Image: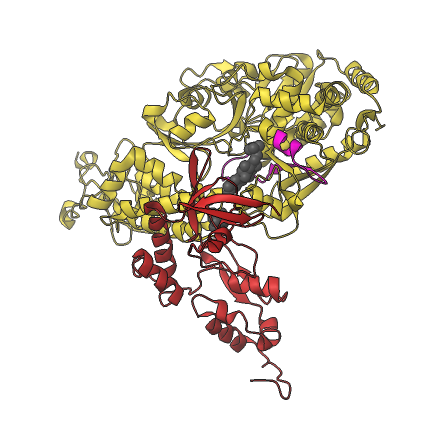
Chain colours: A red, B yellow
Amino acid sequence: MSATLLQIDGKQVEAQEGMTLLEAAQTAGIRIPTLCHHEKLEPYGGCRVCMVEIEKRGWSKLVAACVYPAESDLVVRTRSEKIDRIRKTIVELLLAHAPDSPELLALAREYGANKDRFEAQASFCVQCGLCVRYCAEIKKADAVGFLDRGTRREISFIPELAATVCWDCKECFSLCPTSALQAAYVLTTALVPHPPQVEAGSER
Amino acid sequence: MSRIGSPAELEEFRKGIAATRDPAKVGVTLCCGSACLASGSAEVAVSVEAELKERGLDAHVQLRKTGCRGFCERGPVLVTHPDEVCYLQVEPGDASEIVTQSANGQAVIDRLLYAEPGTGARIPKESDIPFYKHQVRRVFGSNGSIDPKSIEDYLAVGGYSALEKVLFRMTSDEVVEEVKRSKLRGRGGGGFPTGRKWEESRKAPGDAKYVIVNADEGDPGAYMDRSLLEGNPHLVLEGLTIGAYAVGAHEGFIYVRQEYPLAVENVMLAIKTAKECGLLGKDILGSGFDFTVTVHQGAGAFVCGESSALMTALEGRVGEPRPKYIHTAVKGVWDQPSVLNNVETWANVPLIVNQGADWFGEFGTEGSKGTKIFSLVGKITNTGLVEVPMGMTLQDIIFKIGGGIPGGRKFKAVQTGGPSGGCIPEALLGLEVGFDELTEAGSMMGSGGMIVMDEDTCMVDVARYFLDFLADESCGKCAPCREGTGQMLRILTDITEGRGTEGDLELLEELSEVAKEASLCALGKSAPNPFLSTLRYFRDEYETHIAEKRCPARSCKELIAFHIDPAACRACMTCLKNCPADAIDGGKNRIHVIDQDACTKCGTCFEVCPPRYGAVRKTSGEPVPAPILEDERIIVRKSKES
Ligand SMILES: Cc1cc2nc3c(=O)[nH]c(=O)nc-3n(C[C@H](O)[C@H](O)[C@H](O)COP(=O)(O)O)c2cc1C
Ligand code: SF4
């Protein structure tokens, strides 16, 4: 494997081929905030709080660090007035959905985001897709998915699967940055007409 | 149909078709594009056919059902040959007269001809009608003269000669070079140089390569791609096959919207007949080059037209944009090099191959060559599809071809580039159309939508309208677009409904920056355009809405009111009878009054009040005068007195 040399926040960083900017930064101990990223899952590029500025052959632009491949001679800046401003607004937009999310509140403190900037939204979900992707990619169960699009988009458990497959798993609960996924699950199972069959000895 | 196995056989076949066609022969072409079909051209066709049969002329006079001719506003459009007389808004009942005229060469039917506005002078010949006279119909040229269901028709106008030329007389490098030299840029939105894309794909390593037609066309009001595919499917197929040869692909896809059934039908038929003729499939024309095409019907989301979403859909997954920092020309469908081009882009290719890059570049601006088809709609006299040379001014398109604004209203702005395009004001009417020119003006070429707006249009409401579309069509995957367009729509709605507050514009600008810079795909990146361009040119309208709660165009429903001027009202009861909300009180000889609480502001009274009275007033930002006293409402008429 050939190594790639690039500069992140003024530091020379050696990245392995196939690494993303996020991974390259992590090897050098540089932190880039993320919400929808998970090491075990395919990069998604949905929350956009990992936007960084790259400079290449004289022009610069913002890219999502979790999906952009590390390239030789790139100059990367992970903080700037503009980046911070964009991260702050994104966090504020998401706090309208999940005002109590510990992860969002930590980012809000770091970037000076106002939790009440935008009117509270009905859905708790910040659409990071961690539960959906974890269930599809790792568990290969597809018990939870996305419905609809745009601002109406929401996650939804497939009731039949939720009552069977999910009962013994629930691994996605801890992934949810809003901590509200469990509530959504409980709500779904409550809607299932037949209570799930609990085999003798199974954990409750 | 028998298989054509060599260039010589193709030539012979073409000659055979030409021998049966006498250009001096009498004929009738009838537009059967989707728009004309909607205005009744199928029924016209039935009557003309019946008429020909009844008179025993069916062997003598040919009726050809063609694709869209662009003048959709005046459809069904029928043209007689060889004299090229153009009849508009033809009805089945006109068939008998038309057949008599064309078969016997009798005087033209005046009432069906184009009438010049103002003078009323009749113009018989299609090419003399201003709508057509100022166009340069290169790509669209054959649409009106061939039957899209007939490969013979396409061959008769020189079809597949460009394919024969590249397969036998050009290397694939030469084809790429010619397209590069022509400076053709993508007609689907981005304006990316087509030749460069092909070259990148040609050079990229890959087990298989693909070429794809983007016929998703989801812009509301735009239908040029649909019309091309419906009206001249072989032209697009020929372009695609040439592209496949140039990049080294043996498989192609046509991604077309399910809602375009006629386009799907015609292109499927074209593929089938081209295959039977040996112009598609294995060993095309005996050249040894293989190429197959599959039609993929997409189910309608606007974002599926975006390249990465379209490719995901082709792979059989949910059509959602994917983060792509490597060009799809290098890593596209199934991670293989894939060239995606718009319908109109592909349709230009055979012309460039046949006539050369220099001919193509005869027209244009520095960065934009050739012609472009626009869908001209809105407050414009001649709506329809127009093909103009790049570099024509907006002024000429709107006034010379489009015939200006109807109803004596004043031009205000033209919105170009589809939902995420921008609005260009009157001061910039001299702008020459081109990719870079439109972008510099804060709008874009997009796929060629052009919506003309008059003085009654509120620019804040226009921005709100497009944001509404975009927020609805956002796939919702990334936060800046999903949340950002949602919030922008909410703020714009507040402003148009009189709830705007100080700071709204700054917040909108902040959200615009986030969507533009941080969104995953071009939908989100360009979503702020409708707001930003209207703010740039019509800032005062925003400020008036916010500070004075007034809509200067008197268009925003929540900010306007209607009342009847008692001095002008003649109690004619017209508005009273027409009001759908029963909000008007009045009677014979009793001056009418609008009940402000019941009024839904539909504007019916304003439209129906006889111009000689002109008693209904539309106001914004000023209090409605108190209704006059009951005993002052009686009109005492002079005639009654005497
Ligand atoms: C939201 C969105 C919708 C799009 N829809 C279309 C479409 O309907 N047709 C099209 O040709 N290009 C569309 N595009 C542009 C394509 O992504 C792509 O740039 C184009 O098909 C490339 O072909 P061209 O270079 O010939 O223009 C769309 C882009 C976006 C972001
Ligand atoms: S920009 Fe909009 S349409 Fe594109 S991926 Fe993001 S949410 Fe989806």
Kindly indicate the quadrant of the structure image that contains residue A100: bottom left
Can residue B557 be seen here? The reply is yes
Residues A176 and B630: in front is A176
Residue B305 lies, in percent from the top left, at: 56, 42
How many numbered markers are drawn? 0
Identify whether B360 is placed above or below B214.
above
Instruction: Say left or right for B642 vs A89.
Output: left
Kindly indicate the quadrant of the structure image that contains residue B97: top right
Residue drawn 60% across the image and 80% down it: A196
Residue B618 lies, in percent from the top left, at: 25, 40
Residue B3 lies, in percent from the top left, at: 84, 28
Instruction: Say left or right for A28 vs A80.
Output: right
Quarter of the image for the C terminus of chain A: give it: bottom right
Residues A104 and B356: in front is A104
Residues B465 and B306: in front is B306
The residue segment tinted magenta is: B198-223
Residues B640 and B23: in front is B23
Kindly indicate the quadrant of the structure image that contains residue B274: top right
Identify whether B316 is placed above or below B350.
below
Q: Say if the magenta span includes residue B202.
A: yes
Can residue B124 be seen here? The reply is no
Residue drawn 45% across the image and 44% down it: A7
Residue A79 lies, in percent from the top left, at: 37, 49
Identify whether A71 is placed above or below A148.
above
Q: Say if the magenta span includes residue A14.
A: no
Identify whether A84 is placed above or below B354.
below
